[in-house]
Amino acid sequence: MKLCRWIVVLALVGAATAVTAQDLKSPSADQYVPRLGDIMSAAQTRHQKLWLASKAQNWELSAYELRQLKASLVEAALLYSGIPVSNVTTLEPSLQATSDAIATKDGRKFAKALGDLTEGCNACHRSMGRSFVVIKVPADPQPFANQLFAPPARP
Ligand code: HEC
């Protein structure tokens, strides 16, 4: 009985050590490149949280979510060379305006800046054959309340 327990303990310790060593050295972990859709899903979550944080006047969290959102967009442009750099740089003024609104805790300016930023998301989607992915400024705190799921009107 006692021996049996020791074997189990040793097996668990061994397993834990092996996992840690593998975690550090695993070549697949080094080479992992997130799929663009996954980076965008993270951007969507951060866009939503950015809005929620500003609604709650949690400006520190807003600033954090904005940094995270910006990092997602930069990552997308760096990892996916098919994305025109200009599609990301045109977002710079609205990112800056959002950042300024957060710094001055100005809810009204924030709403305008987030609207412009969101239009920037959609402008890139339209230019890259993804016009069916329509992001909107959330209206309620439901998860993914920042994406329109109805088909856009065709011209
Ligand atoms: C520079 C171009 C560009 C910008 C800017 C951009 N996107 Fe995207 N986005 C894409 C592309 C391209 C796809 C399609 C990815 C694919 O098909 O794998 C996409 C897809 C998405 C998707 C669909 C992912 C899914 O799996 O459902 C979401 C959500 C999304 N973007 C959110 C955003 C948000 C939010 C912003 C702005 C904060 C944004 N995107 C800004 C290029 C962009």
Image (cartoon, rainbow, N blue to C red):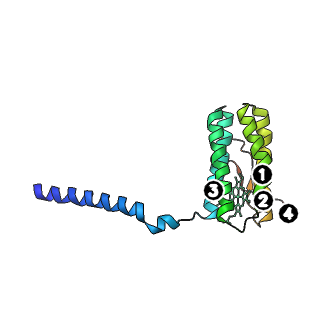
Q: Of discs 4 and 2, which sits in the foreground?
A: 2
Image coords of residue 34 (percent x, y): 58, 63
**Residue where numbered disc 3 is placed:** 41
Indicate the secondary structure of the residue bearing disc 4: loop
Disc 3 on helix, strand or loop?
Answer: helix
Disc 3: CA contacts within 10 A as few (<14), some (14-19) or many (>=20)? some
Q: Earlier in the sequence, mark 1 or mark 4?
A: 1
Indicate left or right for 33 with 125 as reference.
left
Q: Is residue 97 above or below residue 24?
A: above
Q: Residue 49 appears at what percent x and percent y?
A: 63, 43
Q: Amino acid at mark 4?
A: Arg
* Sequence-earlier tag: 3 or 2: 3
Pick the residue in front: 146 or 100.
100
Neighbor class of circle 4 (other Cα within 10 Å; few <14, some 14-19, many 20+) is: few
Residue 127: quarter of image: bottom right
Q: Which is in the foreground here, disc 3 or disc 2?
A: 2
Q: Nearer the viewer, residue 39 or 55?
A: 39
Task: Say the numbered circle drawn on residue 91.
Answer: 1
Q: What mark, if any, has residue 154 been given in the picture?
A: 4
Q: Is mark 2 within 8 Å of ligand 1?
A: yes
Name the amino acid, label 3.
Answer: Ser
